[in-house]
Image: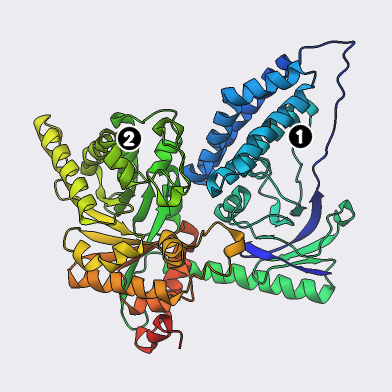
Amino acid sequence: MQYKGRIIFEGYALADILVYEEVNKSRQKNFDQGGDEYERFVYARTSALKSFDELYQSALKTVGEEKAALFQTYRLMAEDLDFEDLVRSNINEGQTAEDAITNASKQIADSFAVLDDEYMKQRAIDVVEVGKNLVNVLLGNNELINLNKPTILICNDLAASFLMKLNRTFLKGLVLVNGNENSHVAIFARTLELPTICGVSNFNLSSAYTGRKGVVDAIKGRLIIDPSQDELDNYNRLAQDYLNENGLLKQYVGKPTVTKDGVKLKIYTNIASALEIENVKKNDGEGIGLFRSEFIYLGSKNYPSEDFQFNYYREVLEEMGKKEVVIRTIDIGADKKVPYFKLAKEDNPALGLRSIRICRKQPEVFYTQLRALYRASVYGNLSIMIPMIVSIVEVNFYKDMIKKVKEDLKRDNIPFNDKVKVGIMIETPAAAIMSDDLAKHVDFFSIGTNDLFQYTLACDRLNPALNDVFNKKHYAVMRLIKMTVDNAHKAGITCSMCGELARDPEMLPFFAAIHIDELSCSCAYVLKTRKALAEIDTQKVDIKQYLDPK
Protein backbone atom coordinates (compact mmCIF):
# COMPACT_ATOMS: atom_id res chain seq x y z
CA MET A 1 0.00 0.00 0.00
CA GLN A 2 1.42 3.37 -1.05
CA TYR A 3 0.31 6.84 0.03
CA LYS A 4 1.50 10.18 -1.26
CA GLY A 5 2.63 12.99 1.02
CA ARG A 6 4.72 16.16 1.04
CA ILE A 7 8.37 16.18 2.06
CA ILE A 8 9.48 17.96 5.22
CA PHE A 9 13.02 16.54 5.40
CA GLU A 10 14.53 14.22 2.84
CA GLY A 11 15.90 10.73 3.41
CA TYR A 12 14.75 7.13 3.77
CA ALA A 13 13.44 5.19 6.77
CA LEU A 14 12.76 1.44 6.87
CA ALA A 15 11.40 0.15 10.18
CA ASP A 16 8.42 -1.18 12.09
CA ILE A 17 5.43 1.17 12.30
CA LEU A 18 4.08 2.62 15.51
CA VAL A 19 0.80 4.52 15.26
CA TYR A 20 0.31 7.18 17.90
CA GLU A 21 -3.21 8.36 18.62
CA GLU A 22 -3.86 10.88 21.37
CA VAL A 23 -5.91 9.30 24.12
CA ASN A 24 -8.79 11.50 25.20
CA LYS A 25 -9.35 10.50 28.78
CA SER A 26 -12.01 12.32 30.71
CA ARG A 27 -12.69 12.94 34.36
CA GLN A 28 -16.00 13.73 35.97
CA LYS A 29 -15.86 15.90 39.06
CA ASN A 30 -17.21 14.20 42.13
CA PHE A 31 -18.78 17.12 43.93
CA ASP A 32 -19.57 15.00 46.99
CA GLN A 33 -15.84 14.42 47.54
CA GLY A 34 -15.10 18.10 47.01
CA GLY A 35 -11.45 18.87 46.21
CA ASP A 36 -9.89 22.14 45.18
CA GLU A 37 -9.85 22.25 41.38
CA TYR A 38 -7.85 25.46 41.38
CA GLU A 39 -5.10 23.80 43.40
CA ARG A 40 -5.07 21.00 40.81
CA PHE A 41 -4.61 23.64 38.10
CA VAL A 42 -1.69 25.17 40.02
CA TYR A 43 -0.13 21.72 40.40
CA ALA A 44 -0.52 21.02 36.66
CA ARG A 45 0.97 24.39 35.72
CA THR A 46 3.95 23.94 38.05
CA SER A 47 4.64 20.50 36.61
CA ALA A 48 4.28 21.76 33.02
CA LEU A 49 6.57 24.74 33.66
CA LYS A 50 9.26 22.37 34.89
CA SER A 51 8.78 20.26 31.76
CA PHE A 52 9.03 23.33 29.50
CA ASP A 53 12.29 24.34 31.21
CA GLU A 54 13.72 20.85 30.72
CA LEU A 55 12.61 20.81 27.09
CA TYR A 56 14.20 24.22 26.52
CA GLN A 57 17.55 23.05 27.88
CA SER A 58 17.38 19.82 25.86
CA ALA A 59 16.37 21.66 22.69
CA LEU A 60 19.23 24.17 23.08
CA LYS A 61 21.69 21.30 22.63
CA THR A 62 19.92 19.61 19.73
CA VAL A 63 18.02 22.18 17.68
CA GLY A 64 19.48 25.53 18.78
CA GLU A 65 18.22 28.71 20.40
CA GLU A 66 15.78 29.68 17.64
CA LYS A 67 13.72 26.50 17.96
CA ALA A 68 14.25 26.08 21.70
CA ALA A 69 12.68 29.51 22.26
CA LEU A 70 9.30 27.85 21.56
CA PHE A 71 9.36 26.30 25.04
CA GLN A 72 10.02 29.69 26.62
CA THR A 73 6.96 30.93 24.75
CA TYR A 74 4.99 28.02 26.21
CA ARG A 75 6.17 29.00 29.68
CA LEU A 76 5.02 32.61 29.21
CA MET A 77 1.61 31.43 27.99
CA ALA A 78 1.17 29.05 30.93
CA GLU A 79 2.01 31.87 33.37
CA ASP A 80 -0.18 34.44 31.61
CA LEU A 81 -2.53 36.14 34.07
CA ASP A 82 -5.41 36.33 31.57
CA PHE A 83 -5.16 32.57 31.09
CA GLU A 84 -5.15 32.01 34.86
CA ASP A 85 -8.16 34.30 35.33
CA LEU A 86 -10.14 32.40 32.70
CA VAL A 87 -9.28 29.06 34.32
CA ARG A 88 -10.33 30.38 37.75
CA SER A 89 -13.59 31.74 36.32
CA ASN A 90 -14.39 28.40 34.65
CA ILE A 91 -13.67 26.53 37.89
CA ASN A 92 -15.95 28.91 39.80
CA GLU A 93 -18.70 27.96 37.35
CA GLY A 94 -18.33 24.33 38.42
CA GLN A 95 -15.92 22.97 35.79
CA THR A 96 -13.21 20.44 36.56
CA ALA A 97 -9.63 21.66 36.31
CA GLU A 98 -9.28 19.68 33.06
CA ASP A 99 -12.32 21.30 31.46
CA ALA A 100 -11.45 24.73 32.85
CA ILE A 101 -7.95 24.60 31.32
CA THR A 102 -9.19 23.21 28.00
CA ASN A 103 -11.93 25.82 27.69
CA ALA A 104 -9.68 28.68 28.78
CA SER A 105 -7.00 27.78 26.20
CA LYS A 106 -9.70 27.44 23.54
CA GLN A 107 -11.15 30.86 24.42
CA ILE A 108 -7.74 32.53 24.03
CA ALA A 109 -6.95 30.53 20.89
CA ASP A 110 -10.24 31.51 19.29
CA SER A 111 -9.50 35.19 19.91
CA PHE A 112 -6.12 34.74 18.18
CA ALA A 113 -7.37 32.60 15.30
CA VAL A 114 -9.87 35.17 14.01
CA LEU A 115 -7.13 37.79 13.52
CA ASP A 116 -5.82 38.30 10.00
CA ASP A 117 -2.27 37.65 11.16
CA GLU A 118 -0.37 34.40 10.59
CA TYR A 119 1.74 34.96 13.69
CA MET A 120 -1.33 35.20 15.90
CA LYS A 121 -2.89 32.16 14.25
CA GLN A 122 0.24 30.21 15.12
CA ARG A 123 -0.01 31.48 18.69
CA ALA A 124 -3.57 30.09 18.74
CA ILE A 125 -2.12 26.65 18.01
CA ASP A 126 0.53 27.16 20.68
CA VAL A 127 -1.88 28.13 23.45
CA VAL A 128 -3.99 25.03 22.75
CA GLU A 129 -0.79 22.98 22.98
CA VAL A 130 0.02 24.58 26.34
CA GLY A 131 -3.47 23.71 27.59
CA LYS A 132 -3.02 20.12 26.46
CA ASN A 133 0.26 19.87 28.35
CA LEU A 134 -1.43 20.97 31.58
CA VAL A 135 -4.38 18.64 31.10
CA ASN A 136 -2.08 15.71 30.32
CA VAL A 137 -0.37 16.22 33.67
CA LEU A 138 -3.74 15.82 35.42
CA LEU A 139 -4.87 12.86 33.34
CA GLY A 140 -1.58 11.00 33.29
CA ASN A 141 -1.37 11.28 29.50
CA ASN A 142 2.16 12.64 29.64
CA GLU A 143 3.82 9.24 29.71
CA LEU A 144 6.41 8.84 26.99
CA ILE A 145 6.22 6.37 24.15
CA ASN A 146 8.99 3.89 24.89
CA LEU A 147 10.91 3.37 21.66
CA ASN A 148 13.22 0.39 22.05
CA LYS A 149 13.76 -0.57 18.41
CA PRO A 150 13.96 1.22 15.02
CA THR A 151 10.56 2.83 14.53
CA ILE A 152 8.54 4.84 12.01
CA LEU A 153 6.09 6.96 14.00
CA ILE A 154 2.78 7.73 12.27
CA CYS A 155 0.32 10.21 13.78
CA ASN A 156 -2.24 12.78 12.72
CA ASP A 157 0.05 15.52 14.00
CA LEU A 158 2.53 15.91 16.79
CA ALA A 159 3.54 18.57 19.27
CA ALA A 160 7.16 19.68 19.09
CA SER A 161 7.35 19.07 22.84
CA PHE A 162 6.32 15.43 22.29
CA LEU A 163 8.95 14.92 19.58
CA MET A 164 11.69 16.30 21.80
CA LYS A 165 10.84 13.77 24.54
CA LEU A 166 11.22 10.72 22.27
CA ASN A 167 14.27 8.46 22.12
CA ARG A 168 15.59 9.71 18.81
CA THR A 169 18.13 6.89 18.60
CA PHE A 170 15.29 4.60 17.56
CA LEU A 171 13.06 7.14 15.81
CA LYS A 172 13.97 6.61 12.15
CA GLY A 173 11.10 8.29 10.33
CA LEU A 174 8.07 10.46 10.99
CA VAL A 175 4.72 10.71 9.18
CA LEU A 176 2.38 13.58 10.07
CA VAL A 177 -0.83 12.55 8.31
CA ASN A 178 -2.58 15.90 8.79
CA GLY A 179 0.51 17.99 9.51
CA ASN A 180 2.06 20.74 7.43
CA GLU A 181 5.51 22.01 6.45
CA ASN A 182 5.33 25.19 8.55
CA SER A 183 4.46 23.69 11.94
CA HIS A 184 6.84 23.71 14.88
CA VAL A 185 7.29 19.95 14.72
CA ALA A 186 8.21 20.20 11.03
CA ILE A 187 10.87 22.78 11.81
CA PHE A 188 12.25 20.57 14.58
CA ALA A 189 12.25 17.50 12.30
CA ARG A 190 14.35 19.38 9.73
CA THR A 191 16.84 20.47 12.35
CA LEU A 192 17.09 16.89 13.67
CA GLU A 193 17.54 15.69 10.04
CA LEU A 194 14.72 13.18 10.51
CA PRO A 195 13.15 11.77 7.30
CA THR A 196 9.64 13.19 7.51
CA ILE A 197 6.58 13.58 5.30
CA CYS A 198 3.22 15.24 5.97
CA GLY A 199 -0.20 15.77 4.41
CA VAL A 200 -0.66 12.13 3.48
CA SER A 201 -3.63 11.74 1.11
CA ASN A 202 -6.41 9.19 1.62
CA PHE A 203 -4.82 7.65 4.69
CA ASN A 204 -6.96 6.71 7.69
CA LEU A 205 -4.98 6.49 10.90
CA SER A 206 -5.48 3.15 12.62
CA SER A 207 -3.65 1.26 15.36
CA ALA A 208 -3.97 -1.79 13.09
CA TYR A 209 -0.83 -0.56 11.30
CA THR A 210 1.29 -0.79 14.46
CA GLY A 211 3.92 -3.52 14.21
CA ARG A 212 3.77 -3.78 10.43
CA LYS A 213 6.72 -3.00 8.19
CA GLY A 214 6.88 0.45 6.66
CA VAL A 215 8.99 2.68 4.46
CA VAL A 216 9.18 6.46 4.51
CA ASP A 217 10.47 7.61 1.13
CA ALA A 218 11.14 11.27 1.88
CA ILE A 219 12.82 11.72 -1.48
CA LYS A 220 9.66 11.16 -3.51
CA GLY A 221 7.19 11.82 -0.69
CA ARG A 222 5.75 8.37 -0.10
CA LEU A 223 4.59 6.19 2.77
CA ILE A 224 4.65 2.46 1.98
CA ILE A 225 2.97 -0.04 4.29
CA ASP A 226 3.68 -3.77 4.03
CA PRO A 227 6.32 -3.37 1.30
CA SER A 228 7.09 -6.47 -0.73
CA GLN A 229 10.48 -8.13 -0.42
CA ASP A 230 11.50 -6.62 -3.76
CA GLU A 231 10.48 -3.16 -2.52
CA LEU A 232 12.40 -3.68 0.73
CA ASP A 233 15.49 -4.78 -1.16
CA ASN A 234 15.22 -1.77 -3.47
CA TYR A 235 14.77 0.70 -0.62
CA ASN A 236 17.62 -0.85 1.33
CA ARG A 237 19.83 -0.18 -1.70
CA LEU A 238 18.49 3.36 -2.09
CA ALA A 239 18.99 4.08 1.62
CA GLN A 240 22.54 2.75 1.49
CA ASP A 241 23.30 4.77 -1.63
CA TYR A 242 21.91 7.84 0.10
CA LEU A 243 24.12 7.22 3.14
CA ASN A 244 27.12 6.61 0.91
CA GLU A 245 26.45 9.84 -0.97
CA ASN A 246 26.28 11.73 2.31
CA GLY A 247 29.46 9.96 3.41
CA LEU A 248 31.20 11.11 0.24
CA LEU A 249 30.40 14.67 1.21
CA LYS A 250 33.13 14.42 3.85
CA GLN A 251 35.69 14.78 1.07
CA TYR A 252 34.50 18.37 0.72
CA VAL A 253 35.42 19.23 4.30
CA GLY A 254 38.25 21.75 4.25
CA LYS A 255 37.97 22.24 0.51
CA PRO A 256 37.32 25.65 -1.06
CA THR A 257 33.91 26.30 -2.56
CA VAL A 258 34.53 26.62 -6.29
CA THR A 259 32.64 25.75 -9.47
CA LYS A 260 33.94 23.40 -12.15
CA ASP A 261 35.21 26.36 -14.16
CA GLY A 262 36.88 28.10 -11.22
CA VAL A 263 34.28 30.58 -9.93
CA LYS A 264 34.89 30.96 -6.19
CA LEU A 265 32.13 31.39 -3.60
CA LYS A 266 31.77 30.90 0.14
CA ILE A 267 29.21 28.80 1.97
CA TYR A 268 28.16 30.38 5.26
CA THR A 269 25.54 29.20 7.75
CA ASN A 270 22.44 30.63 9.44
CA ILE A 271 22.24 30.26 13.23
CA ALA A 272 20.43 31.78 16.21
CA SER A 273 22.56 30.59 19.12
CA ALA A 274 26.15 30.00 20.17
CA LEU A 275 25.07 26.41 20.87
CA GLU A 276 24.73 25.85 17.11
CA ILE A 277 28.37 26.64 16.42
CA GLU A 278 29.36 23.00 16.92
CA ASN A 279 27.14 22.18 13.92
CA VAL A 280 28.75 24.99 11.91
CA LYS A 281 32.18 23.49 12.54
CA LYS A 282 31.05 19.91 11.97
CA ASN A 283 29.63 20.84 8.58
CA ASP A 284 32.60 23.07 7.68
CA GLY A 285 30.74 26.34 7.33
CA GLU A 286 33.13 29.02 6.12
CA GLY A 287 31.52 31.59 8.38
CA ILE A 288 28.17 32.67 9.79
CA GLY A 289 26.16 34.62 7.24
CA LEU A 290 23.18 35.25 9.48
CA PHE A 291 23.18 35.27 13.26
CA ARG A 292 19.61 36.08 14.28
CA SER A 293 20.07 38.34 17.29
CA GLU A 294 16.32 38.81 17.76
CA PHE A 295 16.14 35.46 19.54
CA ILE A 296 18.04 37.04 22.41
CA TYR A 297 15.07 39.40 22.74
CA LEU A 298 12.45 36.71 22.18
CA GLY A 299 14.00 34.65 24.97
CA SER A 300 14.02 37.51 27.50
CA LYS A 301 11.24 38.82 29.74
CA ASN A 302 12.61 42.36 29.44
CA TYR A 303 15.06 44.27 27.27
CA PRO A 304 18.37 42.37 27.47
CA SER A 305 21.12 44.46 29.02
CA GLU A 306 24.25 45.63 27.25
CA ASP A 307 26.44 43.29 29.32
CA PHE A 308 24.18 40.30 28.65
CA GLN A 309 24.31 40.91 24.90
CA PHE A 310 28.05 41.63 24.96
CA ASN A 311 28.79 38.27 26.61
CA TYR A 312 26.52 36.47 24.16
CA TYR A 313 28.11 38.03 21.06
CA ARG A 314 31.60 37.56 22.47
CA GLU A 315 31.00 33.83 22.92
CA VAL A 316 29.93 33.46 19.28
CA LEU A 317 32.89 35.45 17.97
CA GLU A 318 35.43 33.62 20.13
CA GLU A 319 34.07 30.24 19.07
CA MET A 320 34.35 31.15 15.37
CA GLY A 321 37.88 32.51 15.64
CA LYS A 322 39.00 34.21 12.43
CA LYS A 323 35.90 33.22 10.46
CA GLU A 324 33.45 36.00 9.70
CA VAL A 325 30.31 36.27 11.83
CA VAL A 326 27.52 38.44 10.38
CA ILE A 327 25.16 39.45 13.18
CA ARG A 328 21.80 40.84 12.15
CA THR A 329 20.52 43.61 14.39
CA ILE A 330 17.03 43.61 15.94
CA ASP A 331 14.49 42.08 13.56
CA ILE A 332 11.45 42.33 15.81
CA GLY A 333 7.95 42.97 14.44
CA ALA A 334 5.89 41.31 11.67
CA ASP A 335 5.82 37.61 12.72
CA LYS A 336 8.10 38.11 15.75
CA LYS A 337 6.24 39.70 18.64
CA VAL A 338 7.94 40.59 21.93
CA PRO A 339 5.47 41.73 24.66
CA TYR A 340 7.76 44.19 26.43
CA PHE A 341 8.29 46.18 23.21
CA LYS A 342 4.63 47.17 23.64
CA LEU A 343 3.98 47.42 19.91
CA ALA A 344 0.47 48.47 18.95
CA LYS A 345 -1.75 45.99 17.12
CA GLU A 346 -1.45 46.41 13.36
CA ASP A 347 -3.86 45.33 10.64
CA ASN A 348 -0.94 44.30 8.46
CA PRO A 349 2.18 43.80 10.60
CA ALA A 350 4.31 42.56 7.69
CA LEU A 351 3.99 46.07 6.29
CA GLY A 352 4.19 47.79 9.63
CA LEU A 353 6.57 48.68 12.43
CA ARG A 354 9.48 46.25 12.33
CA SER A 355 13.27 46.00 12.36
CA ILE A 356 15.02 49.33 11.62
CA ARG A 357 11.68 51.13 11.92
CA ILE A 358 11.41 50.07 15.56
CA CYS A 359 15.01 51.13 16.10
CA ARG A 360 14.16 54.63 14.91
CA LYS A 361 11.20 54.73 17.30
CA GLN A 362 13.21 53.26 20.20
CA PRO A 363 16.80 54.40 19.52
CA GLU A 364 17.89 53.62 23.09
CA VAL A 365 17.26 49.90 22.44
CA PHE A 366 19.26 50.03 19.21
CA TYR A 367 22.04 51.98 20.92
CA THR A 368 22.37 49.29 23.60
CA GLN A 369 22.66 46.54 21.00
CA LEU A 370 25.20 48.43 18.87
CA ARG A 371 27.31 49.23 21.91
CA ALA A 372 27.32 45.54 22.93
CA LEU A 373 28.27 44.53 19.38
CA TYR A 374 31.18 46.95 19.14
CA ARG A 375 32.45 45.93 22.57
CA ALA A 376 32.43 42.31 21.39
CA SER A 377 34.07 43.16 18.05
CA VAL A 378 37.62 42.78 19.43
CA TYR A 379 37.00 39.07 20.12
CA GLY A 380 36.56 37.90 16.53
CA ASN A 381 35.71 38.76 12.94
CA LEU A 382 32.43 40.67 13.30
CA SER A 383 30.25 42.17 10.58
CA ILE A 384 26.97 43.90 11.37
CA MET A 385 23.90 43.61 9.15
CA ILE A 386 20.90 45.95 9.32
CA PRO A 387 17.55 44.50 8.15
CA MET A 388 14.63 46.07 6.25
CA ILE A 389 16.43 49.12 4.83
CA VAL A 390 14.39 50.90 2.15
CA SER A 391 15.93 54.38 2.08
CA ILE A 392 19.14 56.39 2.45
CA VAL A 393 17.48 58.13 5.42
CA GLU A 394 17.53 54.83 7.31
CA VAL A 395 21.17 54.26 6.34
CA ASN A 396 22.08 57.70 7.67
CA PHE A 397 20.19 56.94 10.89
CA TYR A 398 22.14 53.79 11.70
CA LYS A 399 25.42 55.46 10.70
CA ASP A 400 24.73 58.31 13.11
CA MET A 401 23.95 55.79 15.85
CA ILE A 402 27.19 53.91 15.18
CA LYS A 403 29.15 57.17 15.23
CA LYS A 404 27.70 57.99 18.65
CA VAL A 405 28.47 54.49 19.96
CA LYS A 406 32.11 54.77 18.84
CA GLU A 407 32.50 58.21 20.40
CA ASP A 408 31.04 56.99 23.70
CA LEU A 409 33.23 53.87 23.77
CA LYS A 410 36.34 55.99 23.16
CA ARG A 411 35.28 58.33 25.96
CA ASP A 412 34.85 55.34 28.27
CA ASN A 413 38.22 53.85 27.21
CA ILE A 414 36.55 50.65 26.01
CA PRO A 415 38.36 48.93 23.11
CA PHE A 416 36.53 48.10 19.87
CA ASN A 417 37.32 47.32 16.24
CA ASP A 418 36.90 50.52 14.25
CA LYS A 419 36.93 48.57 10.95
CA VAL A 420 33.80 46.46 11.47
CA LYS A 421 31.92 46.08 8.18
CA VAL A 422 28.32 47.25 8.28
CA GLY A 423 25.97 46.08 5.55
CA ILE A 424 22.25 45.90 4.87
CA MET A 425 19.70 43.31 3.89
CA ILE A 426 17.97 43.62 0.53
CA GLU A 427 14.46 42.37 1.35
CA THR A 428 12.11 44.62 -0.60
CA PRO A 429 11.68 45.61 -4.26
CA ALA A 430 12.47 49.19 -3.19
CA ALA A 431 15.88 48.20 -1.82
CA ALA A 432 16.69 46.08 -4.89
CA ILE A 433 15.64 48.79 -7.35
CA MET A 434 17.71 51.45 -5.60
CA SER A 435 20.60 49.09 -4.83
CA ASP A 436 22.85 51.16 -7.11
CA ASP A 437 22.45 54.12 -4.72
CA LEU A 438 22.51 52.06 -1.52
CA ALA A 439 25.73 50.34 -2.59
CA LYS A 440 27.59 53.64 -2.36
CA HIS A 441 26.82 53.93 1.36
CA VAL A 442 27.26 50.42 2.78
CA ASP A 443 29.98 47.75 3.09
CA PHE A 444 28.00 44.78 1.77
CA PHE A 445 24.58 43.47 0.73
CA SER A 446 22.80 40.34 1.89
CA ILE A 447 19.67 39.32 -0.02
CA GLY A 448 16.88 38.03 2.23
CA THR A 449 14.95 35.87 -0.21
CA ASN A 450 11.92 35.02 1.96
CA ASP A 451 10.83 38.62 2.39
CA LEU A 452 11.96 39.66 -1.09
CA PHE A 453 9.61 37.07 -2.59
CA GLN A 454 6.81 37.97 -0.18
CA TYR A 455 6.94 41.68 -0.91
CA THR A 456 7.57 41.35 -4.64
CA LEU A 457 4.76 38.86 -5.25
CA ALA A 458 2.39 40.42 -2.65
CA CYS A 459 2.07 36.92 -1.28
CA ASP A 460 2.06 35.67 2.31
CA ARG A 461 4.67 32.92 2.26
CA LEU A 462 3.10 31.23 5.33
CA ASN A 463 -0.34 30.88 3.73
CA PRO A 464 -0.67 27.32 2.34
CA ALA A 465 -3.55 28.46 0.09
CA LEU A 466 -1.00 30.55 -1.84
CA ASN A 467 1.59 27.82 -2.45
CA ASP A 468 0.97 28.04 -6.19
CA VAL A 469 1.52 31.82 -6.11
CA PHE A 470 4.66 31.76 -3.96
CA ASN A 471 6.89 30.65 -6.81
CA LYS A 472 10.48 30.61 -5.58
CA LYS A 473 11.73 30.77 -9.15
CA HIS A 474 9.59 33.71 -10.25
CA TYR A 475 11.56 35.61 -12.88
CA ALA A 476 10.60 39.01 -11.44
CA VAL A 477 12.48 38.16 -8.25
CA MET A 478 15.38 36.65 -10.22
CA ARG A 479 15.73 39.96 -12.05
CA LEU A 480 15.83 41.86 -8.75
CA ILE A 481 18.47 39.46 -7.41
CA LYS A 482 20.70 39.87 -10.47
CA MET A 483 20.23 43.64 -10.39
CA THR A 484 21.31 43.70 -6.73
CA VAL A 485 24.40 41.55 -7.32
CA ASP A 486 25.44 43.60 -10.36
CA ASN A 487 25.04 46.90 -8.51
CA ALA A 488 27.01 45.61 -5.54
CA HIS A 489 29.92 44.58 -7.73
CA LYS A 490 29.89 47.84 -9.66
CA ALA A 491 30.33 49.65 -6.34
CA GLY A 492 33.08 47.27 -5.24
CA ILE A 493 31.17 45.60 -2.40
CA THR A 494 30.16 41.97 -1.87
CA CYS A 495 26.67 40.51 -2.11
CA SER A 496 25.54 37.40 -0.27
CA MET A 497 22.23 35.54 0.08
CA CYS A 498 20.75 34.06 3.23
CA GLY A 499 17.77 31.74 3.29
CA GLU A 500 16.97 28.23 2.12
CA LEU A 501 16.78 29.32 -1.53
CA ALA A 502 20.56 29.76 -1.28
CA ARG A 503 21.00 25.98 -1.30
CA ASP A 504 18.33 25.10 -3.87
CA PRO A 505 20.04 22.78 -6.42
CA GLU A 506 17.93 24.17 -9.28
CA MET A 507 18.94 27.74 -8.49
CA LEU A 508 22.64 27.22 -7.75
CA PRO A 509 23.71 27.43 -11.42
CA PHE A 510 22.08 30.86 -11.67
CA PHE A 511 23.60 32.15 -8.43
CA ALA A 512 27.06 30.94 -9.42
CA ALA A 513 26.73 32.37 -12.94
CA ILE A 514 25.83 35.84 -11.68
CA HIS A 515 28.83 35.61 -9.34
CA ILE A 516 27.11 35.98 -6.01
CA ASP A 517 29.85 36.06 -3.36
CA GLU A 518 28.39 34.04 -0.50
CA LEU A 519 25.50 31.67 0.06
CA SER A 520 24.26 31.18 3.61
CA CYS A 521 22.05 28.21 4.51
CA SER A 522 21.27 25.74 7.30
CA CYS A 523 24.30 23.85 8.61
CA ALA A 524 23.09 20.49 7.27
CA TYR A 525 23.30 21.71 3.66
CA VAL A 526 26.80 23.23 3.59
CA LEU A 527 28.62 20.22 2.13
CA LYS A 528 25.78 19.29 -0.22
CA THR A 529 25.82 22.82 -1.61
CA ARG A 530 29.62 22.81 -1.98
CA LYS A 531 29.45 19.51 -3.87
CA ALA A 532 26.65 20.78 -6.14
CA LEU A 533 28.61 23.94 -6.96
CA ALA A 534 31.74 21.92 -7.76
CA GLU A 535 29.79 20.20 -10.56
CA ILE A 536 28.56 23.44 -12.19
CA ASP A 537 30.23 24.98 -15.23
CA THR A 538 29.02 28.58 -15.19
CA GLN A 539 30.13 29.04 -18.81
CA LYS A 540 27.36 26.67 -19.83
CA VAL A 541 24.62 28.29 -17.71
CA ASP A 542 21.97 30.13 -19.71
CA ILE A 543 21.22 33.05 -17.40
CA LYS A 544 18.41 34.26 -19.67
CA GLN A 545 16.24 31.25 -18.87
CA TYR A 546 16.06 32.43 -15.25
CA LEU A 547 15.23 36.01 -16.21
CA ASP A 548 12.84 35.57 -19.11
CA PRO A 549 10.06 32.95 -19.16
CA LYS A 550 9.67 33.11 -22.94
Mark 1 residue element: loop
The residue sitting at 61% across, 70% down in the picture is 242
Q: Which residue type carries mark 2?
A: Gln
Question: With respect to residue 378, does 513 lie above or below?
Answer: below
Left or right of residue 287, residue 178 in this image: right
Residue 13 coordinates in the image, percent (x, y): 70, 62
User: Split into 4 quadrants, where in the image is the C terminus?
Assistant: bottom left
- In the picture, the disc for residue 63 is none
Mark 2 residue element: helix
Q: What is the count of numbered marks? A: 2
The residue sitting at 85% across, 53% down in the picture is 210
User: Within 10 Å of the Cα at label 2, are there few (<14), some (14-19), or many (20+) other Cα atoms?
Assistant: many
- Which residue position is annotated with label 2? 309
Q: Which quarter of the figure has residue 90?
A: top right
Distance in Å between CA atoms under marks 2 and 1: 38 Å
Q: Of marks 2 and 1, which one's residue comes earlier in the chain?
A: 1
Please name the colour scheme applied to the rendered image.
Answer: rainbow
Residue 40 coordinates in the image, percent (x, y): 73, 18
Q: Which quarter of the figure has residue 372?
A: top left
Looking at this view, is 535 or 354 the one in front?
354
The residue sitting at 60% across, 67% down in the picture is 243
User: Within 10 Å of the Cα at label 1, are there few (<14), some (14-19), or many (20+) other Cα atoms?
Assistant: few
The residue sitting at 74% across, 33% down in the picture is 142
Looking at this view, is 270 or 91 the one in front?
91
- Which residue position is annotated with label 1? 143
Asked if residue 341 shows in the view, the reply is yes
